[in-house]
Image (cartoon, rainbow, N blue to C red):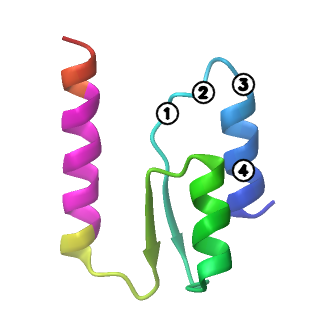
Amino acid sequence: MDGFEFTRHLRASPETEELPVIMITSRSGGKHRQQANELGVDAFLVKPYKEKELMEKLDELLHSEEQENE
């Protein structure tokens, strides 16, 4: 199962459809970015990714989740 298939499974289940997804991949082409976007991936990082970029995305997603729960 690759990340795209995993994301499809997450989004198909009512228990997990709202979980934020950060995809980290070696696939940098527009086709893969578009596919990830269509699946509802929240952030798309290409290997080698920068730790700072990952931490910023995590912070952004966690804070947006907190704001939705208020």
Badge 3: how crowded within 10 Å, few (<14), some, or many (20+)?
few
Pick out the residue farthest to the top. 70
Q: Which residues are magenta?
A: 54-65
Q: Kindly state the secondary structure of the residue where label 3 is placed.
A: loop
N-term mark: 1 or 4? 4
| Label 2 SS | loop
Which of the labelled discs sits on residue 16, or is there none?
Answer: 2
Residue 22, percent from left and from top: 46, 56
30 is higher (above) or lower (below) than 62: below
Judging from the image, what secondary structure is the residue with disc 1 in?
Answer: loop
Residue at mark 3: 13
Q: Residue at x 67, y 48 (%)?
A: 7
Residue contact at pointers 3 and 2, CB within 8 angstroms: yes
Q: CA distance from mark 1 to mark 3?
A: 10 Å
- The residues bearing labels 1 and 4 have C-alpha atoms spaced at a distance of 12 Å
Alpha carbon distance from label 4 to label 2? 11 Å
Secondary structure beneath label 4: helix
Residue, disc 4:
6
Q: Residue at x 19, y 48 (%)?
A: 59
Marks 4 and 2 in Cβ contact (< 8 Å): no
Check disc 4: other Cα within 10 Å, few if <14, some if 14-19, many if 20+: few
Majority secondary structure in the magenta region:
helix
**Reading the chain from its start, which is encountered first: label 1 or label 3?**
3
Left or right, 27 with respect to 8, comes to left
Circle 2: residue type: Thr
Circles 2 and 1, Cβ within 8 Å, touching? The answer is yes
Type of amino acid under label 3: Ser
